[in-house]
Amino acid sequence: MKGEARLGWTLVAPALGVIGLIAIFPLAWTVWESLHVHELRMPWLGKPFVGLANYVEVVNDPRFWAALGHTAFFTVVSIALELLIGLFLALAMNRVFRGRGFVRAAVLVPWAIPTVVAALLWRFIFESQGGIANELLINAGFIEQPLVWFIRTWTAWVPVILADVWKTTPFVALLLLAGLQNIDLTLYEAAAVDGANKWWQLRHITLPLLKPAILVTLIFRTLDGFRVFDLIYVLTGGGPGTSTEPVALYTFNALLQNLRFGYGSALSVLIFAITFGMALLYVKVLGVRLGGDER
Amino acid sequence: MKAPAPITARLAAVAMGALALCSCGKTGAREGQTVLTFSGSALGAEGTLVAKQLRKFSELNPDIRVELQRTPDDANQRHQLYVQWLNARVGNPDILQLDVIWTPEFAAAGWVLPLSRYSPAINEFFPATVEANRWAGELYALPWFADVGLLYRRTDLVPAEPRTLEELVAVAKRATMRPGGPKHGFVWQGARYEGLITGFVEYLGAFGGRILDEKGRVVVNAPEGVRALEFMRDELYGSRVAPLDVLTWHEEEGRFAFQNGTAVFMRNWPYAYEPMSDSAESRVAGKYAVSPMPASGSGGGRSTAALGGGQLAINAYSESPDAAYRLIAYLTAPDQMVERAQSVGQYPTRPALYEEGRMKGLAIPLGDAKRAIESATLRPVTPIYTELSDILQIELHRALVRQAEPKEALDLAARRINALIERTGMRKLMSGETSVAPAAGAAK
């Protein structure tokens, strides 16, 4: 047995090595950097060890907390919309109709477009002069003057959230569709025999049985939403002021624009801790639910 | 963790090495020949010109061979690349093209060599362009070409240049009210980026304010600064001569608006002059002129133009600094500057060239250009400029989109800039104690 165990370890060693090299090592390095002052632009500061000073600076920085708030806002609003519309799409796609395969593929098109390209498209749509959005709204009589979308916080969020919903809903729909197809159709037949209408069937059969799929979707989407960067970078640049700036953009600014490696690393470590915590929480919740379903 | 260079810098160095191997192999160098690498923006006509001038230099100096290393045209990208290379102590490229706001940063970091040992004739250049390249009393780069903020106006609507900012707004307002007049009175760069600072510096000067005083103290929130910012805001929400769109605009959006005839005035750089003279593209060809931005009529200020432009400096890790200086001296000599002005429209930094009648065929009338360069004002000359600018961009933008009151925004900016000065140990450096800068040691 001992020899077998050794063989086992030998066989997994390369995989463990790779994980160590690409996951653990960079993370450890980042943590180490975050304990130092390290500013590429200011070599005269040296690279002194400063303990938790960078973290103290982060938590005392209102811009960080604001960025965290924007990220949470973006995540909650966009995911709520995506789940709602995605569920609707999934239910529609789950019905047997001609050309179903084609529709499923077509729905995925926005998801296949690179985010930066999609963001640029939405930027054009919401351009203040000559943008389609303004033209439509003026023609429909909602507004008289073209709106400058990107200079007010609330109007700047509109293209951001629309773009994300447009792009990601198909992905959500597909995940939910997979869940729908696992539901035993005889349940619906039985319910129909008992006289249950469609609404009752949706509430008491579909949604409860779809819970695992919804939770998986939530995990993927919250973690994604929390890391949102390219979309906002292109659409608003975090503005007006910094009122749509997410944490990833703030970190990018500190790390790659201002080249503050120590401070930027502290930010990265905090973001990592937050997303890791959320993932743990979800896994725990999901584990319980799945276990319950299996029993 | 022994090495001082971070992984990114080292990766960049490796990439650099690979680049050097494939594109600028030094194998072609003859025995005893010095090989220099020149770097800078080298797109299109500019690239052709640089290549031509480098070739001519090599012909005149057979002992030196010059390689051209193309760097991104985008200033931010070039800056980032330089910083990574220099952190990795790479001696290539030998000559760096610095933006006007970078010299103090590179000097304080010890990345570029002091030039006083070569005793360049600095009194032959516009004083402001030399001042931008000084740090702690020492000169670190020579001005290569000058870029300067200009006020463009439609001569068919406004024959005479406005003498004050207030007059500018009044004239713009009147021209837009006229039936069939342009939609916008005044367009400028108001997006949250460096361009916003250059514009703000011009208003600030017009009202007699500054960002930092001569001792390096933050005075941007003084009454002059507040008045300048209030004036900008009033153009948007009071007199409404500037459309709110400018708060998302960079240079090109403004140029398109002006070029399509939808604006009376535009604040922009000299580059816009030439393309707008093409009547196939432009509706205002032959109908515009430039002048420096005017001062405020309220007194205390002066006509101010933000200064931009390219500087040449020697990499502190260069193996042949003397040869590098010879190349810099050649490129910044009168003949090469005239050639540059004629083929890519970038202005010489030598006032004498504007007098001699040598520069024919230039787009912008020389007198106007010279006047603007003479009213040129520097953005703060400090190694922490980029971060300082970042702070100011955010707060100015917040005030202009009405998320904050001008005074409140500038107070906050001042507080954050002071914190930045504190954090970076800049207090000592700015007050003239030069010993902190490692480059001072290299001066010997």
Image (cartoon, coloured by chain):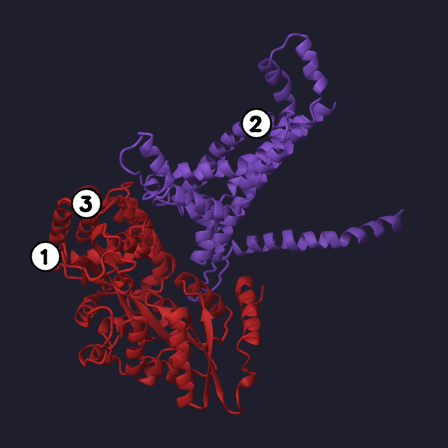
Chain letter matching colour purple:
A
Between B257 and B285, which is closer to the camera in this rendering?
B285
**Comparing marks 2 and 3, which lies closer to the viewer?**
2
Task: Name the N-terminal-most of marks 1 and 3.
Answer: 3
Between A44 and A182, which is closer to the camera in this rendering?
A182
One can see residue A269 in this view: yes
Q: In what element is the residue under mark 2?
A: helix
Q: Position of residue A130 (x, y in %)?
A: 33, 43
Q: Which mark is residue A87?
A: 2
Toward which corner of the image does residue B370 lie, by quadrant? Answer: bottom left
Q: Position of residue A175 (x, y in %)?
A: 62, 33
Q: CA distance from mark 2 to mark 3?
A: 49 Å
Please, what is the three-letter code of the amino acid marked with disc 1? Gly
Judging by the rendered image, the residue that carries numbered circle 3 is: B234
- For label 3, the crowd category at 10 Å Cα-Cα, with few meaning under 14, some 14 to 19 and many 20 or more, is some
- For label 1, the crowd category at 10 Å Cα-Cα, with few meaning under 14, some 14 to 19 and many 20 or more, is few
Left or right, A198 with respect to B349, comes to right
Please, what is the three-letter code of the amino acid marked with disc 2? Leu
Q: Position of residue A220 (x, y in %)?
A: 59, 37
Q: Which mark is residue B299?
A: 1
Q: In what element is the residue under mark 3?
A: helix
